[in-house]
Every structure is written in structure tokens, then in C-alpha cells.
């Protein structure tokens, strides 16, 4: 990874850190793991099982936990912090601002803004983007290229939309929301009235509400509600290619991994974790703090704190036992066949 950060700048980032050793390298030009780091790199010990890799590490600066016992090599600096992984995230945040600076405030000449729209002077609207009637974009927002902001939409302070984001009408987006490339919010829900050999479309007149500090991964789709609202709670993080159906309510601080499908009117309470490719049948309730393993099929309500796996989903440890027993079935059948042949 190519970067440039002064060692003095790195030290200033952690004023309470404990330092040992010193390096003559004034500027770091890479971040690498302990095994692959070379002189001029920054490395870190984020997992205790890699502790043995610290001593032979060639990095010029290493972020370490406070309780790490060991001395730096010559021309090497140790910086001890409470949480090296989080400390590295702070470094990356600093570097992100250098590598990918935010666009200057203002509206690109190729963007189209309806007269009734309101855009704060500190926000940026990228090339070929559209902002619809009566939409409101708050301070310090970044709307990148080729974005569509539908009529009557509100966007809170500090939100960032990457290229190709599409918001349909009347979406409500909170503060510090990140929508990655290709996200679609407010598309019409999947609803049809079946009869007489045909499928009659049911219009969806509701909206989508996304609360503060939510991040939505690339090409994820969040459908608007039939009458009221589809809602994503504060601090929740959705990965790429997630489908959120109409009238779904997702609570605060949930983690939902890639390719999850959530059918209409599902209620997911706070702090739920969902593994990749899990699927939810409609009109279910998932209790607070539940954990759903990858590829699980959820067909009924989930109790708070439950840990489920499999399709249909079962308690995790039971599903593990069944999986072990299934692998023994061929041998069991062979033994049974041998016994039958002796009769």
C-alpha cells in the first residue's frame, strides 16, 4: 500500500502512547503485516497469536498493545497503545483524507438542480448528478458523480454518497450516512395481488428512513414501504448486495453481511449480527442481539440472543452436532448393509 505519513505526525496522533526505541526514518511510505513489513513501513500487532512475528519484523514503526513485553530492534520505534487495531484505523482515516480528499464545496456545472431544492453552501454536488424538487441537502455533504436525489428527500450533515447512488422520492437520510457506489434507496417494494391468472401491481406509497451513522455497501437495495416506512437504525452497517424489502425495520448497531435477503415486514431488533447469504421469510421478528450464521434460512421468529445456523435454522450447537452426524451416515449405512448381508 502506497502512502506518506511523517513519523512525527504519527506520534502526534497518539499523545498518550508509550514509546520505546527510535527510528531515523522520517517518513513512512507503507503499511504491512508483521511478516511482510520492510524498513520504511508501519506495522501493528492486532492479534496476540502473531506475537512471535514482532521480534523479526523489519517495520520502522510498530503499533503494539500496552502490555506487550519486548524491546525494539535498532532503528525501530515501538508505540504502545490500548488497541493497536483501532489505532491503525485512526492512521488509515488520516491517510484516507490525503489519498482521497473530499471535493471542494459547490455544484458541478453538469449537475442539474431543481429550483425548489435546497443545498447547503458547504456541500458538494458532483458531475451529472440530479437533485429533485424540494429536496434538502444539509451541511458538509458529498454527493459524487452520477447520483440521483429524488424529490422531497432530506440528507443530513456530513453524509457521503459515492458514484451512482440512487435515492427515489421522499427518502430521509440522517447525519454521517455513507452510501457506497450503486446503492438504491426507495425503490418500489415487491408487492403484487394475485388472481385471475395474473399479477396486479400494488403501488408502494411509503418511504425509507436511514438514521445517523449508517453505512450501506455497494449495490445494496432498500425498498420503500407500502404505506409507512422502511427503516434502518442508527449505527447499523449493511454490506454489499443486501436486499431489504418493504416495511422492514432494522434496529440500531446491527451488522448485516453481503448478499443477505430480508423479506418484507421483518423486524430486526438492535445489535443483531447476520452472516453472508442468510435469508429471512416475511413478517418475522428477530430479537435483540441474535446472531445468524451465514446461509441460514430464517423461517420463524428468533428469540433475543439466539445463535442460529442452517436451513431451516436451528440453534448453532445443535446444527453443528447434526452436521457431524451427517458426515458419519455413509459409514453407518455401510455397517448396516454388512450386518444385513450376514443374516
Image (cartoon, rainbow, N blue to C red):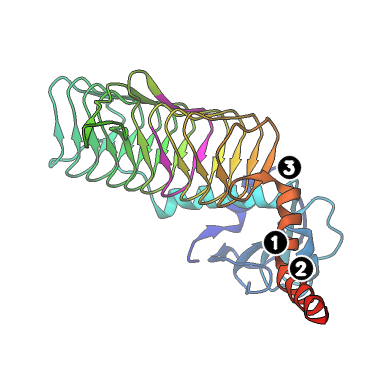
Look at mark 3 in the image and give the residue it sits on: 16
What's the CA distance linking mark 2 and mark 1? Answer: 8 Å
Tell me the crowding category of disc 3: few under 14, some 14 to 19, or many 20 or more residues within 10 angstroms, Cα based.
few
Residue 158 is one of the magenta-drawn residues? no
Q: What residue does disc 2 label?
A: 54
Picture disc at residue 62: 1
- Whether the magenta-drawn stretch holds residue 243 is answered as yes
Tags 2 and 3 touching, CB below 8 Å: no
Closer to the camera in the image, 151 or 319: 319
Q: Nearer the viewer, residue 337 or 153?
A: 337
Q: CA distance from mark 1 to mark 3?
A: 16 Å
Identify the residue at image location x=83%, y=65%.
71
User: First in sequence: mark 1 or mark 3?
Assistant: 3
Contact? badges 2 and 1 (CB < 8 Å):
yes
Which mark is in front, 2 or 1? 2
Most foreground residue, 152 or 57: 152
Q: Residue 196, position in %: x, y?
A: 21, 32
Residue, x 75% and y 62% (percent of image)?
325
| Tag nearer the camera, 1 or 3 | 1
The answer to whether 256 is drawn above or below residue 136 in the figure is: below
Question: SS at mark 2?
Answer: loop
Helix, strand or loop at label 3? It is: loop
Please tell me in which quadrant of the rendered image residue 323 appears.
Answer: bottom right
- In the image, which residues are magenta? 230-245
Residue 6's place in the image compared with 150, above or below, is below
Amino acid at each position: 500500500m502506497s502512502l506518506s505519513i511523517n513519523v512525527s505526525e504519527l506520534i502526534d496522533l497518539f499523545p498518550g502512547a508509550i514509546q520505546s526505541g527510535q527510528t531515523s526514518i522520517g517518513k513512512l511510505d507503507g503499511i504491512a503485516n508483521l511478516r511482510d513489513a520492510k524498513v520504511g513501513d508501519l506495522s501493528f500487532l492486532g492479534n496476540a497469536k502473531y506475537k512471535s512475528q514482532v521480534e523479526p519484523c523489519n517495520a520502522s514503526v510498530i503499533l503494539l498493545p500496552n502490555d506487550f513485553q519486548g524491546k525494539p530492534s535498532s532503528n525501530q520505534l515501538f508505540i504502545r497503545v490500548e488497541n493497536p487495531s483501532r489505532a491503525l484505523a485512526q492512521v488509515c482515516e488520516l491517510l484516507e483524507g490525503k489519498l482521497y480528499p473530499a471535493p471542494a464545496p459547490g455544484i458541478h456545472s453538469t449537475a442539474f438542480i431543481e429550483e425548489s431544492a435546497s443545498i447547503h453552501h458547504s456541500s458538494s454536488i458532483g458531475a451529472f448528478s440530479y437533485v429533485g424538487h424540494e429536496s434538502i441537502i444539509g451541511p458538509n455533504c458529498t454527493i459524487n458523480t452520477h447520483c440521483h436525489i429524488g424529490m422531497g428527500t432530506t440528507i443530513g450533515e456530513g453524509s457521503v454518497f459515492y458514484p451512482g447512488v440512487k435515492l427515489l422520492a421522499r427518502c430521509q437520510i440522517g447525519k454521517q450516512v455513507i452510501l457506497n457506489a450503486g446503492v438504491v434507496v426507495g425503490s418500489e417494494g415487491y408487492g403484487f395481488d394475485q388472481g385471475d391468472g395474473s399479477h396486479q401491481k400494488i403501488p408502494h406509497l411509503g418511504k425509507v428512513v436511514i438514521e445517523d451513522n449508517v453505512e450501506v455497501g455497494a449495490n445494496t437495495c432498500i425498498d420503500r414501504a407500502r404505506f409507512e416506512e422502511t427503516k434502518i437504525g442508527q449505527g447499523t452497517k449493511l454490506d454489499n448486495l443486501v436486499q431489504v424489502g418493504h416495511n422492514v425495520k432494522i434496529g440500531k448497531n446491527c451488522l448485516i453481511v453481503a448478499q443477505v435477503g430480508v423479506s418484507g415486514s421483518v423486524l430486526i431488533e438492535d445489535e443483531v449480527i447476520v452472516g453472508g447469504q442468510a435469508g429471512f421469510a416475511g413478517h418475522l421478528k428477530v430479537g435483540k442481539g441474535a446472531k445468524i450464521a451465514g446461509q441460514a434460512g430464517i423461517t420463524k421468529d428468533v428469540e433475543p440472543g439466539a445463535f442460529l445456523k442452517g436451513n431451516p435454522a436451528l440453534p448453532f450447537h445443535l446444527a453443528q452436532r447434526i452436521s457431524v452426524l451427517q458426515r458419519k451416515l455413509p459409514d453407518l449405512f455401510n455397517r448396516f448393509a454388512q450386518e444385513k448381508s450376514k443374516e
